[in-house]
Amino acid sequence: MKIDLTQTHDVEGAFNSIDWSDIKTKYHDPATLYAFSVLNCTKTAGYKIKLACFRHLMDLKRQGQSDFPYHYDVKEANNLLTFARICPNVDTGEPTKLMEWQEFTFALMFGWRDEDNNKRFTRVIDSVSRGQGKTYQMAILVCY
C-alpha cells in the first residue's frame, strides 16, 4: 500500500485510514508503542517524528514482501535498550532513564535489519535542542 504525503502532509489522517490491529497484536516493544502514542496524539511530537513513526509502522506492515528486504528484530532493539539501562551518566554516576524518543530512535537504529542481519540505517541525524540528552545517548552508542 503506497501513501503519498507530499501533497497533504496529513500523517494522522493517513494513519487513521489504516487498520493496525495486526501490528498492535504482534508488537509491544518501546518503539512501536511510542509510534502509536504519537500518531494517536497522546504524545506531542513534531512533524518529522510523526513521519518517522508512520514509516516505522508502515515498514512493519511491509515486512516479508519481495520489494522490502528488511525486518524488524525486536531482540536486537531490546539488547541496546537493556544495555542503556545500566550505563551511568557521567555527571551523576547513576544510570539515567532514557526518554521515550531516545528509546524510539535507538530501537529504529538497531532493530531494523537487512537480509544479512546488518543494520538498515548506517547514518542517523539526531537534532534536538541543547540539554536534551544527545551526549548521553551518543556515549551509550559508542560504548555499545
Image (cartoon, grey):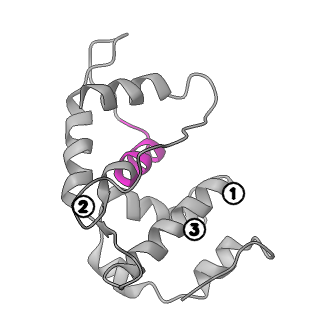
Q: Choose top left, top right, bottom left or bottom right for residue 87.
A: top left
Quarter of the image where the C terminus is located: top left
Reading the image, the residue beneath label 3 is 39
Q: Residue at x 39, y 64 (%)?
A: 32
Q: In this view, does 40 lie above or below 104?
A: below
Task: Give the crowd class for mark 3: few <14, some 14-19, many >=20 residues within 10 Å.
Answer: many
Q: Which residue, given by chain and number where applicable, does mark 1 sit on?
A: 47
As drawn, the label of residue 74 is 2
Say which element carries label 1: helix
The answer to whether residue 105 is above or below residue 96 is below
- Residue 14 visible in rendering: yes
Residue 39, how many percent across, how many down?
Answer: 57, 68
Residue segment shown in magenta: 98-108
**Looking at the image, is 60 positioned above or below residue 95?**
below
The CA distance from mark 3 to mark 2 is 20 Å
Left or right of 98 in this view: 118: left
User: Position of 73 compared to 61: left or right?
Assistant: left
Decide which of tag 3 and tag 2 comes sooner along the chain.
3
- The kind of residue tagged 2 is Val
